[in-house]
Amino acid sequence: MQIIRDPDGLNSALAEFEGETVALVPTMGALHAGHMALVEEARRHADRVVATIFVNPKQFGPNEDLARYPKREAEDAAMLEAAGCDLLWMPGVEDIYPPGFATKISVSGVSDRWEGEARPGHFDGVATVVAKLLLETFPDVALFGEKDFQQLAVIRRLVADLNIPTEIVSVATVREEDGLALSSRNAYLSPTERQQATALYRALCDAGDLLRGGRSPEAVLAEGKSALLDAGFSRVDYFALVDGATLEPVTVAESGTRLIGAAVIGGTRLIDNLAI
């Protein structure tokens, strides 16, 4: 696996893949089995797999965890190589946002609610960096996990609106045996919080069962929020039933709808979702 840290080196490395299909797996590092599932799926879609590690400062708010976001370059590179990645692009902030950088990409509508309300500016940072990574690597396909479901919807809208010729492929959330979605931020949880954190997925599953059984979404969602607070979460930012494409709230559970939730336990904010 080649490890590239400068733009000129990236261009030269990509030129070696001429005539072959390329899959991109963008990450912020601190890799886990969920990321490896993206690489595994990428290998099924293309001849070559390019991964990126870039902790994007523009998607962190002023009171968020940019400074303490885990960084383990050597371990991450070893995991990617073992998984069959062909090229790792690890740019510096100055490579992505050089002096004078003044462009911001905003994806209206699908980014406005939920994470967009809880983390103002977050999706502008996501859309901007993903657009840059896609235009730097020109992949045939790019893979993103369903755990960050609203992010996935934003990226799909971005690619469609800007006519970027990359197929966006989603990969199912990878979970621990007890259901907790794998996340780099799980490392922040204390042992007690780690046990309590499973309540988020359990609340989504319980709500999904009730909705499929014909219960009123309004009542089901209220019960889900209460269950999270009773389980030890200090705050529930949202627990909602939404359209899977637009992320707008809906009042009827049907094919294509999605349960989404975000809640805080200790000092860690967790998100998860479930297809209906």
Image (tube, rainbow, N blue to C red):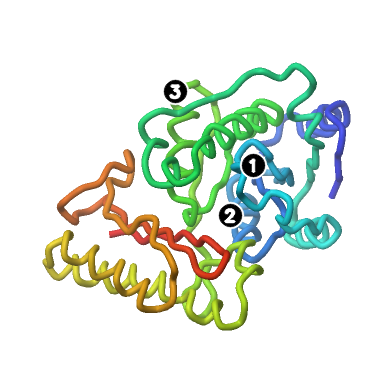
Q: Going from the N terminus, do you reach mark 3 or mark 1 first?
A: 1
Query: Of helix, strand and loop, which one carries label 3?
Result: helix
Q: At label 1, which amino acid type do we have?
A: Ala
> In the visual, does 51 lie left or right of 126?
right
Neighbourhood count class around disc 3 (C-alpha, 10 Å): few under 14, some 14–19, many 20 upward: few
Q: From what the image shows, is residue 105 above or below residue 199? A: above
Tally of numbered discs: 3
Residue 23 at x, y = what percent? 64, 42
Read off the residue under disc 3.
161
Q: Residue at x 54, y 70 (%)?
A: 266
Query: Of helix, strand and loop, which one carries label 1?
Result: strand
> CB atoms at circles 1 and 2 under 8 Å apart?
no
| Distance in Å between CA atoms under marks 3 and 1 | 21 Å
Q: Quadrant of the C terminus?
A: bottom left
> CB atoms at circles 3 and 1 under 8 Å apart?
no
Indicate which disc residue 23 carries: 1
Query: Depth check: 255 or 14 in front?
Result: 255
Given this view, does label 3 or label 2 mark the residue nearer the observer? 3
> In the visual, does 19 lie left or right of 214?
right
Q: Going from the N terminus, do you reach mark 1 or mark 2 first?
A: 1
Residue 144 at x, y = what percent? 55, 48
Q: At label 3, which amino acid type do we have?
A: Asp
Neighbourhood count class around disc 1 (C-alpha, 10 Å): few under 14, some 14–19, many 20 upward: many
Residue 128 at x, y = what percent? 60, 29
Read off the residue under disc 2.
41
Q: At label 2, which amino acid type do we have?
A: Glu
